[in-house]
């Protein structure tokens, strides 16, 4: 195949956003524009796997192998499974030397979960409780995009993880998927649709992460006080009042908000999430190929938060 290779000076970084939602989110596009104002941005909405195959193939060839190094893909959208479907298409479509660097971060779930888990790990460590291996973590409402990844990261750190949901079946489905992926029985599903069920779900946990939808309180303060006797660190990713954990302020960043319990609120996690996302873009822009997924996002989070990790 003959391919046109323009002189290097004309090569511009181009970031192509493939969003599975009806309207592509401006969030990641604006983040990228501020980081790389000289780059070019293309965005597509409502992308399915068939569209993705065509778009990715059409992005691979026109700039030749040299130009492909400057073309990047960002996969986003609310539906994690659809985003992963597109990632599979990207992996199958690309071959050397026409490989593009691909970031996948559906609706910020990978970077947010990485930020939340790394921040709770650092705090746990700083307060003298060691690492997460063999500890118990509970991810409240861990069935959403952020919670599922956070639960997987806790399990990968060696925690036994309880994932809660208002529906037991949903919680169990997430737990089985995690166990299948990590090849070990670390995750368990539990129903938490009433305070007594939430109490049971946090009773043995040293780490609790509240990962529910915006504006939904999941952990009443009296439940944490009365049943969270083993709890050391609590994180919350919902910044919209009422926040997920009663009594924990969104700006709290390692504050002892109950005796022996330190908390991290959503607005302390948000800036760290943005830092991780910026590093993902940097790696994509600086490398000619590679898949930048939640594992890479979490490695970045740990390398920033625990520089010697
Ligand atoms: N700080 C940041 O930088 C950042 C970035 C991205 C997202 N976020 C926040 O992270 C949180 C999680 O995001 P997400 O997209 O994963 O959330 P999501 O899918 O909207 O919700 C997560 C889970 O919350 C539960 N839920 C929904 N409505 C509920 C209700 N009325 N009562 C009780 N539980 C309910 C659902 O679990 P069940 O149906 O299984 O019970 C759902 O799976 C949100 O608060 C979001 O705003 C923060």
Image: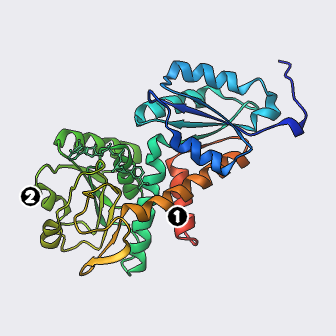
**Picture colour scheme:** rainbow
Horizontally, is 198 left or right of 243 in the view?
A: left
- Looking at the rendering, which quadrant does residue 75 occupy? top right
Crowding at mark 1 (Cα within 10 Å: few <14, some 14-19, many 20+): many
Q: Residue at x 42, y 75 (%)?
A: 125
Q: Is residue 219 left or right of residue 39?
A: left
**Can you tell which quarter of the image residue 15 is in?**
top right
Residue 127 to residue 52: above or below: below
Which is more toward the observer, 162 or 222? Answer: 222
Name the spot of residue 87 as percent of width and height, x first.
53, 33
Task: Residue 277: give x, y in percent of width and height.
Answer: 56, 52
Q: Secondary structure at mark 1?
A: helix
Mark toward the viewer: 2 or 1: 2
Q: What separation in Å lies between label 2 and label 1 (alpha carbons)? A: 34 Å
Residue found at the very far left of the displayed protein:
196
Tell me which label, 2 or 1, sits earlier in the chain.
Answer: 2
Numbered disc 2: secondary structure? helix
Q: Which residue is mark 2?
A: 196
Residue wearing tag 1: 302
Quadrant of image for the N terminus: top right
Say whether residue 185 is visible: yes
**In terms of depth relative to the viewer, which is nearer, 145 or 268?**
268
In-image side of 124 versus 284 (left or right)? left
């Amino acid at each position: 195949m003959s391919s046109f290779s323009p002189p290097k000076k004309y090569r511009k970084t181009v970031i192509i956003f493939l969003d599975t939602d009806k309207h592509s989110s401006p969030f990641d596009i604006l983040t990228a524009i501020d980081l790389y104002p000289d780059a070019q941005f293309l965005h597509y909405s409502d992308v399915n796997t068939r569209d993705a195959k065509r778009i990715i193939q059409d992005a691979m060839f026109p700039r030749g192998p040299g130009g492909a190094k400057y073309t990047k893909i960002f996969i986003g959208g609310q539906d994690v499974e659809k985003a992963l479907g597109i990632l599979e298409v990207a992996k199958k479509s690309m071959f050397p030397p026409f490989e593009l660097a691909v970031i996948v971060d559906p609706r910020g779930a990978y970077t947010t979960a990485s930020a939340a888990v790394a921040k709770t790990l650092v705090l746990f460590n700083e307060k003298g409780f060691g690492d997460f291996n063999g500890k118990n973590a509970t991810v409240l409402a861990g069935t959403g995009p952020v919670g599922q990844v956070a639960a997987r990261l806790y399990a990968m750190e060696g925690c036994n993880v309880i994932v809660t949901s208002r529906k037991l079946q949903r919680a169990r489905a997430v737990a089985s998927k995690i166990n299948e992926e990590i090849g070990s029985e670390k995750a368990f599903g539990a129903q938490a649709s009433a305070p007594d069920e939430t109490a049971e779900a946090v009773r043995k946990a040293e780490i609790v992460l509240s990962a529910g939808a915006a504006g939904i309180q999941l952990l009443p303060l009296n439940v944490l006080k009365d049943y969270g006797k083993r709890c050391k660190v609590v994180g919350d990713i919902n910044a919209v009042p009422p926040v997920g954990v009663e009594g924990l302020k969104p700006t709290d960043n390692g504050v002892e908000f109950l005796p022996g319990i330190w908390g991290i609120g959503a607005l302390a996690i948000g800036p760290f999430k943005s830092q991780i996302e910026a590093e993902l873009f940097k790696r994509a822009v600086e490398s000619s190929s590679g898949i930048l997924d939640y594992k890479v996002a979490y490695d970045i989070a740990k390398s920033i938060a625990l520089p010697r990790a």
